[in-house]
Image: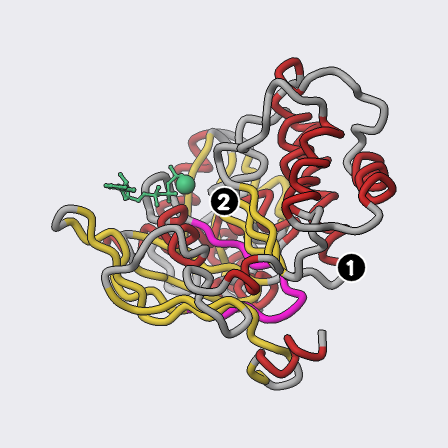
Amino acid sequence: MILSSIILQACGDKMKVIEVKNLVKDFGGRRVLDGISFEVEEGEVFGYLGPNGAGKTTTLRIILGLLNPTSGEAMVMGKNLAEDDEARKKIGVVLENDGLYEGLSAFDNLEYYAQLYDVSNRKEKIEDLLRFVGLYGRNEKVGFFSKGMIRKLAIARAIINDPEVLFLDEPSAGLDPEAQRMVRNLILELSKEGKTVFLNSHDLDEVQRICDRIAILQRGKIMVCDAVKSLRRKFSGPRVIISTSDNKSAGRAFEILNPLDFVSNCEIDGKKISLMLKENKQSSLLRKLSENGVEIEEIRKVEVTLEDIYFKMQKEEEK
Ligand SMILES: Nc1ncnc2c1ncn2[C@@H]1O[C@H](COP(=O)(O)OP(=O)(O)OP(=O)(O)O)[C@@H](O)[C@H]1O
Ligand SMILES: [Mg+2]
C-alpha cells in the first residue's frame, strides 16, 4: 500500500488510479476511439457508459494492456499494464467471456487462479469468497451453473488476489433481475471495502444505482464525465409529469409548453405531459396553463434519471 501510494499521483486528497490520456484507436482505417481522456480516483465506482459498439470494451482492453492503442496512453496505478507484471497482479478483471473452466467445480476454479496468484491461506480464502458470492457448498461442475452463478464465480475469481482495482465489462448483461441485484450488491460491498471499480455498462439504471461518477462515450468521444449527482443537478431541473383531464387538453398543453424556453424534452403520452423544467419555474408553468384555460388534474416532480440525461444529450448531439 505504501508503495502504491508513492506510485500514485496525488489528485487533491485522492489518488488517480486510472489515467487515460488522448486514446485513439483505429480498426482498419475506422476510428473507434477519437481522443479519449478521463481519470478514476481511488475508491471510486466509475461507470463507463455508451451504446453498443461505442468503444467501451475497446477502451477497457487498451487499459488492461490487451490491445495497443493507435496513439495515447492508459495507466493503472501509474503503470502501463501491458508492460508491468507486478501492476497486473493488483487488478481484477471480469470480461464478457468469463474464462472459467467448465469441467471444474467453483472451488477448483478458484483454487487454480489462487495458485496462479500465489495466494496464501488458499482454502480459507476461497471458502470465504464462495460465501461472499453465495456459492458456498455448490460442488457441481461449473458447466452445470446458471449464467448468474457463473458471473458470481467470475467476480469471485476476479477478487481472489485482493485487487486494488476491479474492471468489469457488462457484469450484469444477460442476468435476471435477482442476479443483477446480487452483482450490484457485490460491487457496492467491494466499494465499501475501498476498492476502485471500473464498470463498463449500457445499463443506465444499474450505473446510477452504484456509480459515483460516469463518463458517457458516443461516436468515439466522451460526451460527459462527471459525478452522477452533479450531472443530475447540472443537466436539468426536475422532470415534471402533468396529468390533464383528457387527450385534447394534453395536446393543448403540449402546444403551449413545448416552445417555452424554460421547458425541454416535452413529451406527450395520452392525457399526460412529461417535461424537464428549469429550477423555480413551476409557478410560471402553471400560470401559462391557467391563462390558456388548460385544466390540470395533477402535477408531480420525479427525480431526473441518467436515462433522461443520456437521451437529452443524444438529442442535443443530433441537432
Ligand atoms: N478487433 C477488432 N477489429 C475490428 N473492429 C473491432 C475490433 N474490436 C472492436 N471493433 C469495433 O469497434 C467498435 C467498438 O467496439 P466495442 O466492442 O469496443 O464496443 P462496446 O461499446 O463495448 O459495445 P457493446 O456495448 O456492444 O459491448 C465496434 O464497431 C466494433 O465492431
Ligand atoms: Mg463491450
- Residue numbers of the magenta segment: 38-49
In-front residue for pair 316/148: 148
Q: Height in image: 56 above or below 70? A: above
Within 8 Å: ligand 2 and the Cβ of disc 1?
Answer: no
Task: From the top left corner, tell me how far across and down residue 218 is, in percent.
Answer: 32, 53
Q: Which residue is mark 1?
A: 193
Spatial CA span between label 2 and label 1: 22 Å
Q: Which residue is mark 2?
A: 201
Neighbourhood count class around disc 1 (C-alpha, 10 Å): few under 14, some 14–19, many 20 upward: few
Please name the residue shown 43% across and 37% down the image: 268
Q: Height in image: 193 above or below 58? A: below
Identify the element where label 2 is drawn. strand
Q: Residue 213 vs residue 56: left or right?
A: right
From where the camera sits, is residue 201 visible?
A: yes
Q: Residue 131 vs residue 108: left or right?
A: right
In-front residue for pair 286/87: 87
